[in-house]
Structures are given as C-alpha cells and as structure tokens.
Image: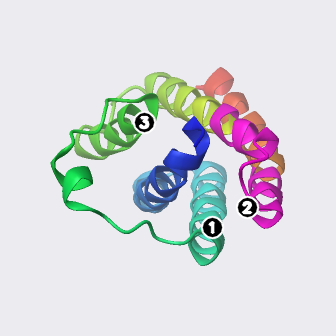
Amino acid sequence: MTDTTSSISDLIEISEDGTAFYEEAAAKVKDKKVSTLFARLAKAKSDLATELSGEVKPVAKTKASKTTKKPASSLVELSKVYAGMRKQWPDSPAERFTRMAEIEGQLQTTFQKVVLDRDHSFVVRVLAKQYVSKAEVLNKELRACQRNA
C-alpha cells in the first residue's frame, strides 16, 4: 500500500475541514471578491470530499489498528492548520493569505501524487486530477489576493 492509498480517508477529512474553514472565512471577510473566492474554495473541497467518499471503501478497523498510534504526517499537520486558523483568525490579511496559500499548495501537491499513483482506481485518480485543475485556478486567485494584501 502506498502513502497516498493509506491517506485518502485523511484527504477526505481534510477536504471537509477545508470546506468548513472556507465557508466560515467567506462569512468573516468584508471584501466581496475575497468572500466569493473563499466560497468557491469551499465548494471545490466539498465536491471533492463528497465524490471521493462515494468511491473509497471504508477500511474495517481491527483491534490492532485501533491501538496502533498513527504516525504524524504532513496531512495531519494540514488538518491542524485549518483548525488553528479557525480558532485564531490572523489579523493581518497578508499573513492569512500566506498561510492559506501554503496549505493549498501542499494539498495540491498531495493530490497530484494521488493522480500519479496507479494503486488508486481510475475514478479516484480522475477525481483528484479534476480537483488539481480547479485548485490551480483558485490558488492563483488566492496568491493574487496575497500580493494585494
């Protein structure tokens, strides 16, 4: 089993966390263009989580897997970053956009690995590729907001 195979459920969970984060962020910001961008990011993540959830079979947990501690990974750290930003919304727009761009860049790289991983079904790889395409456009807009902040 590859790293991305074992992390698809984590990616779904992170996408759900990202959806909640960007929905909340869209409501917090006063700039309508930024709010619209955040709403589009939330929708892309929500669509991805829904579609991937329909394609990935849940893994049955054994007694051994319940007691085995999961190693810390960059995916777990990404999930914590979303939670941290929700709890402590940075006052500086530049800092906000920098952190968001970092998170999204790391996720995009991770999904690109899923696209290339032949251990996944064709459908999962296509869904990941579609997300990467959407994310590239949205991340460019996010970086533009970062430059303008």
Q: Secondary structure at mark 2?
A: helix
Relative to 50, does residue 30 appear above or below in the rendering? above
Locate residue 102, reporting x and y percent. Answer: 55, 26
Q: How many marks?
A: 3
**In the visual, does 147 lie left or right of 88?**
right
The three-letter amino acid code for the residue at tag 1 is Leu
Verify whether residue 130 appears in magenta. yes
Q: Which element is circle 3 on?
A: helix
Amino acid beneath label 2: Val
Quadrant showing the N terminus: top right
- Is residue 67 or residue 90 the one in the foreground? 67
Is residue 108 among what the camera can see? yes
- List x then y, in percent, for residue 19: 49, 60
**Residue 68 falls left or right of residue 5:** left
Q: Could you say which is closer to the camera, residue 83 or residue 71?
A: 71
Name above or below for residue 73 compared with residue 63: above
Going from N to C along the chain, the mark reached first, 3 or 2, is: 3
Numbered disc 1: secondary structure: helix
| Residue 125 located within the stretch drawn in magenta | yes
Quadrant in which residue 63 is drawn: bottom left
Amino acid type of the residue that numbered disc 3 sits on in the rendered structure: Leu
- Residue 141 appears in the rendering: no
Residue 78: image tag: 3
**Which numbered disc covers residue 52?**
1
Comparing marks 3 and 2, which lies closer to the viewer? 2
**Mark 1 or mark 3, which is nearer the start of the sequence?**
1
